[in-house]
Amino acid sequence: MDYLPTTHRNRPMLLLITLFSLCAALLALKLGSTTVSWNALWQILNGESSGVLSTVVLELRLPRLVAAFVVGGQLALAGLLMQVLLRNPLADPYVLGVSGGAAVAALFVLLLGVSSFWLAPAAFAGALISMALVFGLARLRGSWEPMRLLLTGVVVAAGWGAVITFLLAVSPDQALRGMVFWLMGDLGQPELPLWEPVILLVGTLLAYLLAREINVLARGGSQAAAFGVSVERLRLLLFLLASLLTATAVTLAGSVGFVGLVVPHMIRLMGGSDHRLLVPASVLLGGGLLTLSDILARTLLAPQQLPVGVVTALLGVPLFLYLLQRSGR
């Protein structure tokens, strides 16, 4: 059933966003402490070159590019879903406290000084525990109402924040820098787990298949129910999907702010209202934006690297204020 009319005039916008993401990807492979010429980059990507530059591009920059794109896409899609579910344009992927649980587990591993191998599994387990805690507490007295979930998430996030402050306060100096760096967002993890891009692909496909129902849900639960949409089932499914996307993003990169908040607004202001467009456009623009932020994080003070979360905040604050002014809010 086609709940809302399809708009084909926004397809050029999707093409423009795709070109932006491709340009950001090429720049991520080219730029760094050592700049690679376009000719050398073409030869490396074609397998016609080997040596130090080839190692830098294929073994260092390419995995980091994929990680940045995956995390950016996950956060943008999660932010889009949260804004629809809570009917709040200021909602972001971290509103339910998922990142807090991941941060506590990751900081605990760093505090113990064990192998970095355990960092990602611990962060993911912490995020899942936080998800279970929020959904379990919200369900104690009935259905998963958006306001109940939101309030529960805010309280749980505040609790995790207190634990994070305690861990930072008792941490030795040699562990403190790594802990703070992780909290600010870090894409320097040496390996990208295979399940990270798989979750992004599955989540994007699922959200796209549900886009017509999300279109109606965005107009209100009562109108969605009148169209025959199972509102509670859809809300629960989207909450779980957004939380899982956030959990996997935080596991890989720590807390990277503003991507999930700003990207959906940017696409809506460019004319996108149909979620059959918003879902793929958010993933592409979120991935491209975080890739661009990571380029700046690697090159602004090269060879020293900034946490990517610092760059997204520096870009996100003025950009979001501009978007608010444009939208007339």
Image (cartoon, helix red, strand yellow):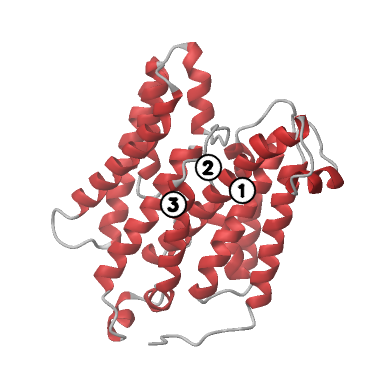
Q: Marks 2 and 1: which is nearer the front?
A: 1
Pointer 1: what residue? 290
Q: Mark 2 and mark 3 in contact? Answer it, CB < 8 Å.
A: no
Quarter of the image with the N terminus in it: bottom left
**Spatial distance from mark 2 to mark 3, Cα to Cα?**
10 Å
Query: Which residue is pictured at 74% across the width and 47% down the height?
Result: 45
Coordinates of residue 49 in the picture (x, y in percent)? 79, 40
Question: Dot 1: what SS?
Answer: helix
* Position of residue 316 in the picture relative to residue 141 (left or right): right
Q: Using the image, determine if residue 100 lies above or below residue 139.
A: above
Among numbered discs 1 and 3, the one appearing first in the sequence: 3
Image quarter of residue 311:
top right
User: Label 3 amino acid?
Assistant: Pro
Please, what is the three-letter code of the amino acid marked with disc 2? Val
**To which quarter of the image does residue 325 belong?**
bottom right
How many residues crowd mark 2 within 10 Å: few (<14), some (14–19), many (20+)? many
Label 3's element?
Answer: loop
| Residue count near mark 3 (Cα–Cα under 10 Å), binned few <14, some 14–19, many ≥20 | many
> Disc 1 or disc 3, which is closer to the eye?
1
Q: Can residue 260 be seen in the rendering of this structure?
A: yes
Vertical position of residue 253 compared to residue 176: above or below: below
Task: Give the labeled residue for mark 2.
Answer: 256
Q: Residue at x 39, y 56 (%)?
A: 242
Q: Mark 1 and mark 2 in contact (Cβ < 8 Å)?
A: yes
- Residue 191 in percent (x, y) is at 52, 35
Residue position marked by numbered label 3 in the rendering: 93
| Residue occupying the point 51% across, 77% down | 274
* Distance between mark 1 and mark 3 Cα atoms: 15 Å
